[in-house]
Amino acid sequence: MTLAAFEALDYSMSPLGELILRRREVLSLDRAEVFEVKLNGEFLMSSIVNDAEIALAEFALPLVACDSCDVMVGGLGLGYTAKAALDAENVASVTVIEYLQRVIFWHQRELVPLGRPLTQDARCKLIHEDFFAVVGSPAKVNDRPAIPHSSLLDEIASKRFHAILLDIDHSPQCLLRAEHTAFYTSQGLKRLTNHIQPGGVFALWSADPPEDSLTDSLSSAFASVHIRESKFYNPLLDEQDVNYIVIAQRATSA
């Protein structure tokens, strides 16, 4: 069966607004198949521009001195960070926390390329929860529906991970929700360390260069902080691009 050159695979009104998953062929790239996500009419992510999402795991996980690491990923998206974590030699489990149930549905129904690899890997769990609530910096509800409290939330929140990888906001300066601000403060990041093993790492994807206020807040909570650039070619824009991976590591003794 010949697939259409453009398909809207799923549409929903999510707690964050209008959410669309679509598939299209890009004629300028020899009809390459691209899966894209739009939120409230704005482009959010693409299956063909994923270098930095993969780098988030590839930059951070080698720093963890662990042969059987437990990893938490904040934000599922199209699954590239989670898949890169599963591909790491030292990873035993990946727990992905995703606020939008519909995004998990895409993977369970195999509407996206990494749906099967993630859902069929016994080491991987896709959890419908609010990442910020899990790590102790819950967003204020306001007009955003809260996820009902569950025993699973307690189980995850009480566990210490060897690495926590976060890709939810565009950057700490450009948030999906203003209520996320509390997480990026010194207090919020200190609460985060309660969920990370001694010697473990927290890594954050950012589309923008991190501001000094973020690195200062991280330095107050972690033993070391550094920033790496993920440079890549964006075929959709036909230009070189750069994203940023901020990595903070706990001291080996806490």
Image: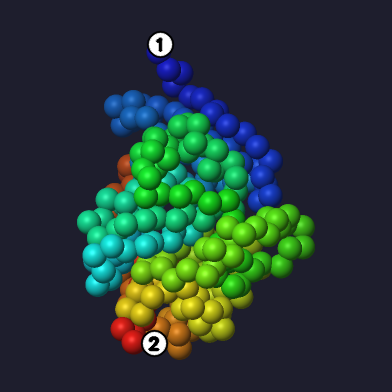
Q: Quadrant of residue 5?
A: top left
**Residue 106, percent across and down?**
51, 37
Q: Which mark is residue 1?
A: 1
Callout 1 secondary element = loop
The amino acid sitting under disc 1 is Met
Q: Nearer the viewer, residue 116 or 41?
A: 116
* Residue 163, image x, y percentages: 37, 67
The image quarter containing residue 152 is: bottom right
- Image quadrant holding the C terminus, namely bottom left
Which of the image's four quarters has the N terminus?
top left
The scheme the figure's colours follow is rainbow
Q: Earlier in the sequence, mark 2 or mark 1?
A: 1
- In percent of the image, x 66 and y 51: which residue is there? 16
Write down the residue under mark 2.
254
Q: Is residue 52 above or below residue 197?
A: above
The 10 Å Cα crowd at callout 2, few under 14, some 14 to 19, many 20 or more, is few
Residue 169 rendering spot, x and y as whole percentages? 53, 61
Question: Residue drawn at (45%, 85%), measured in percent from left and top?
Answer: 221
Name the residue at the top extreme: 1
Asked if one can make out residue 67 in the rendered structure from this viewpoint, the answer is: yes
Q: Nearer the viewer, residue 211 or 98?
A: 98
Which label number is shown at residue 63? none
Query: In the image, what residue type sits under mark 2?
Result: Ala
Q: Of 1 and 46, which appears nearest the observer?
A: 1
Where residue 100 appears, x then y in whole percent?
60, 48
Question: Which is closer to the viewer, label 2 or label 1?
Answer: 2
Residue pictured at 60% horizontal, 45% vertical = 101
